[in-house]
Amino acid sequence: MIVATLTLRRRAAAWLFAALACTTSLHAAGRKPNIVFFLADDLGYMDIGANNPKTFYETPNIDALAAKGMRFKQGYAACPVCSPTRASIMTGKYPARVGVTDFIGGAQPGQWNRPTRLLPAPYQEHLALEEVTIAEALRDAGYATFFAGKWHLGEGEFSPKAQGFDPHLAGSTQFYYPRDSPPGDPKNDPKTTDRIADAAVRFIDANKDQPFFAYLPFQAVHIPIGAKPELVEKYQHKRAAAPPEAWGSERASKVRLVQNHAAYAAMLEQMDAAIGRVLTALERNDLAERTVVVFMSDNGGLATAEGHPTSNLPLRAGKGWLYEGGIREPMIIRAPGVTKAGSVCDTPVTSTDFYPTLLELADLPQRPRQHVDGVSLVPLLKGGQLARGPLFWHYPRYGNQGGAPGGVVRDGGWKLIEWYEDSSPELFNLSNDLEEKHNLAAGNPAKVKELQAKLAAWRKEVGAVMPTPNPNYDPTARPQQAAKQQDGATE
């Protein structure tokens, strides 16, 4: 009895200590926690050392962040291209629900001149002002809000300052790139990576005495590739010991099978160093233990087109594709006092989940009518479980990287891709086929029917707009011609 009583007391003390740790870190002196959100552009799941110890690239600051937080092994972007995922982060809604289903700047159906079987579905070319973004929710709760980097959710009246980011705060030298960045320093900062970090550090220094939300969507590692010459030279030497060039194919697309691109590696190291500078600013201002830090990428690594700078193996394909290489992302959340350092989560989660998660970490009321598709990840961050339903994707477009229109449902270990050109299904069991090599559809008709029904019901529920037959379809056109970028736009 005495032993049992002591055990219970020790457990109670441990629970109290954990609760106090949370209070003395994120909510010190009754102050709400700061939030810093890093978003990489086109960074693949296998591009960081925390996910891939054998990577050619060097990401010590991102890896250190993972060692102090929770790394998600099945963190997903809501779309395999840029703008839709960014919209999901800002709104907590699936891209199909807000109508942003392609990168802003891509061709609308009336501008389409590829001889593809389908015309891509129309999409919204800005994030609607009626949406209450996570920045607006935090601003209304007293947060100073900051933005520097790539917005890609609309220009002019639809810029970040119209969606909750205040350009008039102390130290807030905010700037944004609607789509492509203005030229940076062509030699030392071609992707304006250091400029973004400089602005963020000034903002943190100036606003250290109030809660703040800093959103830093980098341009790196998007093409065109550029980095400091000395870093490029470093990786050119390192490449001598790297695997030689190796290529495969994905439908009509050539796909890179190895990581050995020196300039890409240099560009990534420069971004990693910029992240390190921002994290150092938190530490210098004694804010690290009171700041939630999020790291994510907007879509998978570019492996099948436009220079093929990285490889996502063992994940299949990459940016612009609905295979794992296009949607599974490096994802890390550090929440001091909430998350055990170095923890790893294997629960599938997606970018709609950030909105409710950040609200809960900030001890703010949930907004379920806004973040209707998101689920708070705080139970996972605390080491618990999260029971959620299936995850869905809707990409009714032809990607510049060779991907075709399709939809996806991920339910448990099962993943079904429905290709919209002919409604053909591919069924994979990711529990034992991460590479998506074995299409199990033919042998599992009942499972295919079940998942297709869920996908169809979800599309109806969110109002997903579908592609339509193309009157200029040419079945004799070569696949390369059909997939060729048609309007000069890049994402």
Image (spheres, rainbow, N blue to C red):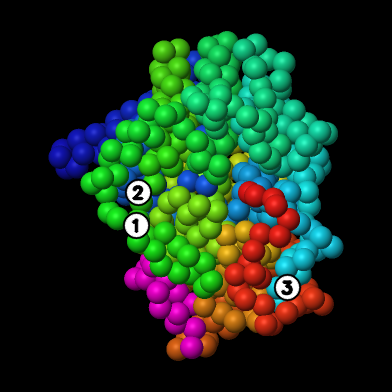
Q: Is residue 404 above or below residue 300?
A: below
Magenta segment main secondary structure? loop
As drawn, is 217 to the left or to the right of 317?
right
Mark 1 neighbour class, 10 Å CA radius: few under 14, some 14 to 19, many 20 or more: few
Q: In the image, which disc is placed on residue 363?
A: none
Q: Which residue is located at x 27 percent, y 54 percent?
A: 243
Query: Residue at label 2?
Result: 260
Quarter of the image for the N terminus: give it. top left
Q: Say whether marks 1 and 3 touch (CB < 8 Å).
A: no
Query: Residue at label 1?
Result: 245
User: Sequence-wise, which precedes: disc 1 or disc 3?
Assistant: 3
Query: Residue at label 3?
Result: 115
User: Residue 443, image x and y in percent?
Assistant: 45, 89
* Magenta residues (range): 427-442
Q: Say whether marks 2 and 1 touch (CB < 8 Å).
A: yes
Q: CA distance from mark 2 to mark 3?
A: 35 Å
User: Residue 224, image x and y in percent?
Assistant: 55, 42
User: Sequence-wise, which precedes: disc 2 or disc 3?
Assistant: 3
The amino acid type found where label 3 is placed reads: Pro
Q: CA distance from mark 2 to mark 1?
A: 8 Å
Q: Which residue is located at x 73 percent, y 68 percent?
A: 114
Q: Which residue is located at x 78 percent, y 48 percent?
A: 125
Tell me if residue 350 can be seen: no
User: Sequence-wise, which precedes: disc 2 or disc 1?
Assistant: 1
Q: The residue tagged with tag 1: helix, strand or loop?
A: loop
